Image: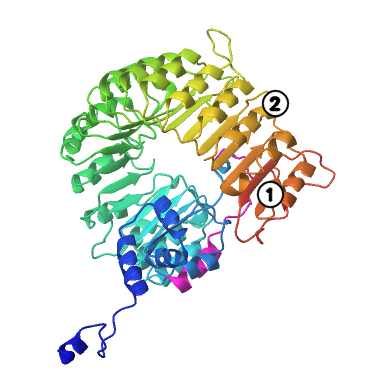
Amino acid sequence: MGENRAEVPGCGGDSQPPCPDQVLENVLENVLRFLTSRRDRNAVSLVCKSWYLAEALTRSELFIGNCYAVSARRATERFRRVNSVVLKGKPRFADFSLMPLIWGAHFTPWLTAFAAAYPWLEKIHLKRMSITDDDLAQISHSFPHFKELTLVCCDGFGTSGLAILASKCRQLRVLDLIEDEVEDDDVVDWLSCFPDNGTCLESLSFDCVELPINFDALERLVARSPNLKQLRLNQFVSIGQLYRLIVRAPQLTHLGTGSFSPPESWVPGEQEPDYRAAFAACSSLVYLSGFREIVPDYLPAIYPVCGNLTSLNFSYANLNAEELKAVVCHCYKLQTLWVLDTVRDEGLEAVATTCKDLTELRVFPIDAREDSEGFVSEVGLIAIAEGCRKLQSILYFCQRMTNAAVIAMSEKCHDLVVFRLCIMGRHRPDHLTNEPMDEGFGAIVMNCKKLTRLAVSGLLTDRAFGYIGKYGNSVRTLSIAFAGDSDMALKYVLEGCSNLQKLEIRDSPFGDSALRAGLHHYYNMRFLWMSSCKITLEGSREISKALPQLVVEVFRSGLAAVRDEDEFVDTLYMYRSLEGPRNDAPTHVRIL
């Protein structure tokens, strides 16, 4: 009896039971491996120290929304097992030439840290970062198992860096270049540099590369990439060349068509391939984009695949209403649609009639000037509200709008998460009643309980911001342009929107008093951007003194430095950081 008892763990034998804390830690780590949401993981890490450590050990994907919010050293010391990185740099207004050309967001110091800490790294996704050809070369040398590179709105690199990456990263599955500025110095035939004996490519996007390509090399590359599912071409690929590619790759699910026009050497009356049959063979296609220099006569070629499409991007295609109608009448499964306003209200009415599953709509202006004519109005918005009840996200550029139309959308589309209405002319009221647009935007925040992103425009008084502060508790990103009467408008927002993370303001009458109203909340926000407002240099200094863990940057849109004698600040960019002020700011960017 005693001998048997001695053999039982925990009853006096040589075997010792595992520590209860160790058991809990092992269980926790196994559970956390299945937790993928960044928000949930962040919440777990705040429970206690042991959960903080366990969460760090099990995190394989690292997301950093501001490259200056934390240092590369701190990130790599905490997270030791990362194989995928998402890193963002400049704020969104960099896309609209509202920042100095030389500002920062360099990837080099991050890459140096990643190369030392994560030699097994497989994926890098950068947005609004500066990455050089040397960086691309270091990626290819430092990470032997590297598989995916996605660059969105990045700059600083050219085709020579792409050539090194293509030749050295033998396991490369994804190379997506999206809205990047690719330098044209020392142009290299990078498409010829992929391995000759077959590739692992699953996605290749280079529609933003505004340089001629070696099409024969591209055709050979597509032929030896049997796993290729996504291909987005630039405007130097004609529809005849597109035909040759899709015949070789009928397995594609996502396609950017290139120019969608014949080559310059084409002779009218010349026999052309059967484009329609080639598209019909691509039975897996669910996404179409491109159409950068479209000849509408070729549009019937895509009709056979329209019935299967869930996403259609015509944001480069100058189509009229009739041309759009001929396409969307086949698109019963469409969930995402991007178009130019040249489709007019009539085109949007056709969308509303057919596309009942639409969840995202973006309508861009073909002419973004404030005094442009504008081709869509409240008529198109009301049609979408009536016909597309599943809508979750809308971006709508127009020159005229009514409160009634916006209210209708708030009442019909209760699942709206993103509502961005951009009335391009400054301070424009409801064009039928001449009243401010207050009630329309008020209805959006009152009726759309899932709303997290809101962009406002048109003639708005402080009353509209009172509505946003009172009912917009779920809003995390707010963009304001040419709006508000006084500082009270911004005070309503800062005191009421407790979940606000990103606040972008331009050309509005808000001053130091409004800025001080957010002192209690700025540490909880990712950033605040204010340009062409009434913020003074002294007021900005007061904020930096009151909140020392915030970085307060002031600068002009050009390269001129901010001077002590300047009274008002052109642009204020304020963000939280664990590291304090950065050490790579150029001389024309002043950190207070």
For the residue pair 577 and 83, the one nearer the viewer reads as 577
Q: Percent position (x, y) of residue 576?
A: 60, 52
- Magenta stretch? 95-118
Of all residues, the one furthest to the top in this rendering is 433
* Residue 492 horizontal side relative to residue 500, left or right: right
At 68% from the left and 37% from the top, the residue drawn is 517
As drawn, the residue found furthest toward the right would be 565
Given residues 173 and 462, the one toward you in this image is 462
**Drawn side of residue 163 relative to residue 73, left or right:** left
Q: Quadrant of the rendered structure where residue 291 is?
A: top left
Secondary structure type for disc 1: strand
Q: Earlier in the sequence, mark 2 or mark 1?
A: 2
Total numbered circles:
2
Quarter of the picture holding the N terminus: bottom left
Residue 553 is marked as 1
Q: Position of residue 204 (x, y in %)?
A: 33, 51
Q: Is residue 84 above or below residue 527?
A: below
- What label does residue 147 carry, if any? none
Residue 546: x, y in percent?
Answer: 72, 50
Which residue lies under the disc numbered 2?
486
Q: Amino acid at mark 1?
A: Glu
Residue 558 vs 312, above or below: the answer is below
Magenta stretch: includes residue 49 = no
Residue positioned 36% across, 62% down in the render: 166
Tell which tag, 2 or 1, sits nearer the viewer. 2
Report whether residue 259 is seen.
Answer: yes
